[in-house]
Image: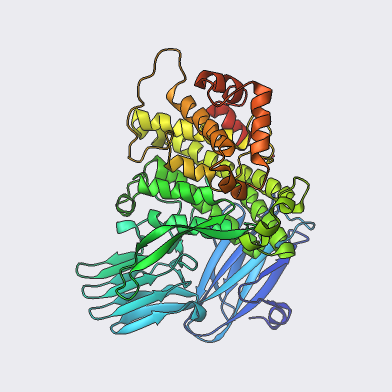
């Protein structure tokens, strides 16, 4: 490499973003990065200003051009390099079209340990020793070989090489809910729900436990293909959702739901607890999707994608992308993800100031803490607004795509109609016609919604697909309107019932019973009023069509 270039090249730091501007179209920026033999580096040029096109080239230590880039989309360029000897590589950033001296681009490099060759004994990959990358040749686990990949480990499979498990070999992906095994750079889904570059021969075995697989998807105007959004077993998703919402919840507590057999002879009974946190209804809904058969590990591993799998995977994808952008202080690629980032940031700002509240903090001074002008109450109200705005935007976005590619119409008619009702009830819960429960016109996500979808006369179907709705007399409330208004009517019954109100007063930080009575007085309703009366006073003023709901959430401004 020319000595002048070597001297002025800027040293890059592994895992950090370097930002700079290209003042003119003829300008080039030079960078350097040290690699040891057997290591690999991935280089990403991103956040390019609108209206320009930048690119990069990679040179080896001798100054020979090694490669250019592969575009991931119009604003991201990507390259990788595998080192055969110790030395510096050089990276040139230049303009292909135009320049913008007022806006910075971002250059990011990640160092990996290359994995290749043969594993014939026991080997373990740990997160603190990684990240790792399949490269420089295939990685083959032969008979008698065992590769354990521990929780939190990152494995990059973005290369031409594969990971192959032969007969008698074993691959164990041992993630957990807090630290899944992360697979980066997959290009397509392979057999049994894994990625395309993982090959399993007869007699080999793979154990999968909390694994998150990210696919490289080139930006397109077309909806993402089913099975190409996120690769996480459906039964593992509720725990990941719980972890995500607990990051921003102002309070964390738990209640005892019962006891269950632990399977341990020395301690046969275990207390079963339910975590209480802001946003818990999302976990409860996801668990209902699994329990009712709408999401299924077996179908997922066979590559079968229904409406529920597509929307659920899309929503989880948005959560994971928002967490990544939030942790790395990166901009979002889409406004739906930015709304999730806003939710996390608002929750974090409260927790940095007040910490995480427990029931022991609130209950001794419950009346003071739950006054409408208290800081806690105001924060809960703001979080409720951000919750519904972020959650519903993502769900409506993926619901809209599922309809475009025909997954919605593939469901049986009763299930198809039930899906429509779910989307309408989501929006209705976020935009009630009255100021309800001191949270404005929103139902706070503190567990009541999750309880009612699993219990009571209006619970969601526990089989898949949904059975036909029971016939109703002509002129009465239809099945889906009845479910919607029945849920809200049941909220009032719980809040005004002496035996249940004290329970929900803790869950809902508000003088809920007083407000519920005021609403009934204003509308002239009673708990014994007909469903038609409740529909006229509560449902009709707020209900929106599916098209109106899409218009509401899918505008970027």
Q: Position of residue 72 (x, y in %)?
A: 54, 56
103 to 523, vertically: above or below: below
543 to 320, vertically: above or below: above
Q: Residue shown at 23%/67% (left/top)?
A: 201
Residue 68 in view: no
Q: Please give left or right for residue 258 compared with residue 91 in the image.
A: left
Q: Position of residue 153 (x, y in %)?
A: 47, 73
425 to 157, vertically: above or below: above
Residue placed most toward the observer, 400 or 1: 400
The C terminus is located in which quarter?
top right
Residue most extreme to the front: 498
Residue placed most toward the observer, 242 or 47: 242
Residue most extreme to the top: 474
What is the image's colouring?
rainbow
The N terminus is located in which quarter?
bottom right
Q: Position of residue 53 (x, y in %)?
A: 65, 54
Q: Please give left or right for residue 462 compared with residue 372 in the image.
A: left
Residue 252 in view: yes
Q: Which quarter of the figure has residue 301?
A: bottom left
Q: Please give left or right for residue 234 compared with residue 379 in the image.
A: left
Residue placed most toward the observer, 457 or 195: 457
């Amino acid at each position: 490499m020319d000595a002048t270039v070597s001297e002025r090249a800027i040293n890059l730091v592994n895992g950090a973003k370097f930002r700079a501007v290209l003042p003119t179209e003829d300008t080039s920026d030079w960078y350097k990065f040290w690699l040891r033999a057997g290591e690999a580096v991935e280089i990403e040029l991103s956040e390019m200003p609108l209206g320009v096109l930048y690119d990069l080239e990679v040179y080896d230590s001798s100054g020979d051009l090694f490669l250019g880039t592969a575009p991931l989309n119009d604003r991201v360029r990507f390259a990788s390099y595998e080192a055969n000897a110790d030395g510096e590589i050089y990276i040139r950033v230049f303009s292909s079209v135009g320049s913008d001296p007022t806006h910075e681009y971002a250059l990011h490099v990640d160092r990996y340990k290359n994995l290749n060759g043969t594993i014939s004994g026991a080997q373990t990959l740990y997160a603190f020793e990684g990240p790792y990358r399949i490269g420089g040749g295939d990685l083959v686990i032969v008979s008698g070989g065992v590769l354990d990949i521990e929780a939190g480990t990152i494995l990059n499979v973005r290369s031409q090489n594969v990971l192959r498990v032969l007969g008698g070999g074993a691959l164990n992906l041992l993630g957990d809910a807090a630290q899944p095994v992360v697979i980066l750079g997959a290009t397509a889904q392979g057999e049994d729900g894994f990625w395309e570059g993982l090959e399993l021969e007869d007699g080999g075995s793979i154990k999968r436990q909390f694994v998150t697989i990210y696919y490289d998807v080139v930006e397109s105007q077309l909806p993402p293909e089913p099975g190409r959004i996120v690769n996480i077993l459906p039964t593992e998703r509720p725990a990941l959702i719980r972890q995500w919402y607990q990051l921003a919840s102002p309070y964390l507590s738990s209640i005892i739901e019962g006891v269950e057999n632990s399977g341990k002879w020395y301690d046969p009974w275990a207390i079963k607890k339910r975590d209480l946190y802001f946003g818990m209804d999302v976990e409860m809904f996801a668990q209902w999707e699994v329990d009712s058969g709408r999401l299924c590990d077996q179908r997922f591993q066979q590559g079968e994608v229904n409406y529920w799998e597509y929307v659920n995977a899309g929503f989880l994808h948005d959560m994971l992308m928002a967490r990544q952008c939030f942790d790395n202080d990166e901009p979002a690629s889409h406004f739906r993800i930015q709304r999730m980032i806003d939710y996390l940031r608002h929750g974090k700002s409260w927790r940095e100031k007040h910490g995480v509240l427990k029931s022991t903090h609130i209950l001794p001074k419950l009346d003071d803490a739950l006054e409408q002008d208290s800081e806690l109450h105001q924060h809960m109200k703001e979080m409720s607004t951000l919750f519904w705005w972020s959650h519903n935007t993502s769900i409506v976005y993926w619901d809209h795509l599922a309809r475009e590619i025909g997954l919605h119409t593939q469901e049986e008619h009763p299930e198809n109609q039930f899906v429509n009702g779910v989307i309408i009830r989501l929006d209705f819960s976020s935009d009630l016609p009255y100021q309800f429960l001191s949270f404005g016109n929103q139902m706070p996500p503190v567990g009541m919604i999750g309880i009612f979808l699993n219990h009571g006369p209006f619970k969601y179907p526990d089989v898949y697909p949904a059975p036909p709705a029971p016939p109703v007399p002509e002129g009465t409330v239809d099945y889906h309107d009845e479910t919607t208004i029945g849920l809200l009517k049941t909220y009032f019954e719980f809040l005004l019932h002496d035996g249940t109100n004290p329970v929900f007063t803790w869950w809902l930080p508000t003088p809920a019973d007083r407000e519920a009575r005021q609403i009934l007085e204003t509308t002239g309703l009673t708990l014994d009023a007909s469903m038609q009366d409740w529909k006229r006073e509560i449902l009709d003023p707020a209900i929106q069509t599916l098209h109106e709901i899409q218009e509401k959430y899918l505008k970027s401004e």
